[in-house]
Amino acid sequence: MSATLSEPPPASAPSESRSAAATALILAGLLLTLLLAALDSTIVATAMPRIVGELGGFDRYTWC
């Protein structure tokens, strides 16, 4: 008694490329993420000496 296996579906065609609007939206999201990360690091780097000074940790603060 042999069981018949169904054949796998044929390989599909390569997926269609994203539309221009979708690509622009993805790019805008990535650029916004990079902008916010750069802004955050700039603010923290500027404020860090004052924060460390007020907490009394200049002996543990590195300048590398």
Image (cartoon, rainbow, N blue to C red):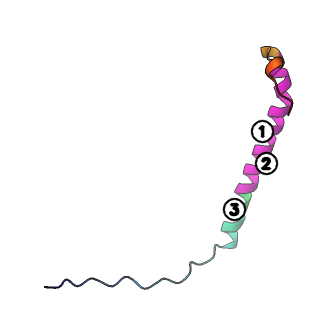
Badge 3 density bin: few <14, some 14–19, many ≥20, Cα 10 Å: few
Q: Secondary structure at mark 2?
A: helix
Mark 3 or mark 1, earlier in chain: 3
Could you tell whether 63 is left or right of 30 in the image?
right
Q: Is residue 50 magenta?
A: yes
Please state if 62 lies on the left or on the right of 9 as rendered: right
The residue that mark 2 highlights is: 35
Q: Position of residue 25 (x, y in %)?
A: 69, 62
On the image, numbered disc 3 is attached to which residue? Answer: 25
Dots 3, 1 in contact, CB < 8 A:
no
Mark 3 touching mark 2, by CB under 8 A? Answer: no
* Residue 48 in the image, given as x and y percentages of width and height: 82, 27
Mark 1, residue position: 40
Query: Which residue lies at the image location 64% right of the left edge and 73% below the top edge?
Result: 18
Q: Main secondary structure of the magenta part?
A: helix
Q: Is residue 15 above or below residue 58?
A: below
Amino acid type of the residue tagged 1 in the rendering = Asp
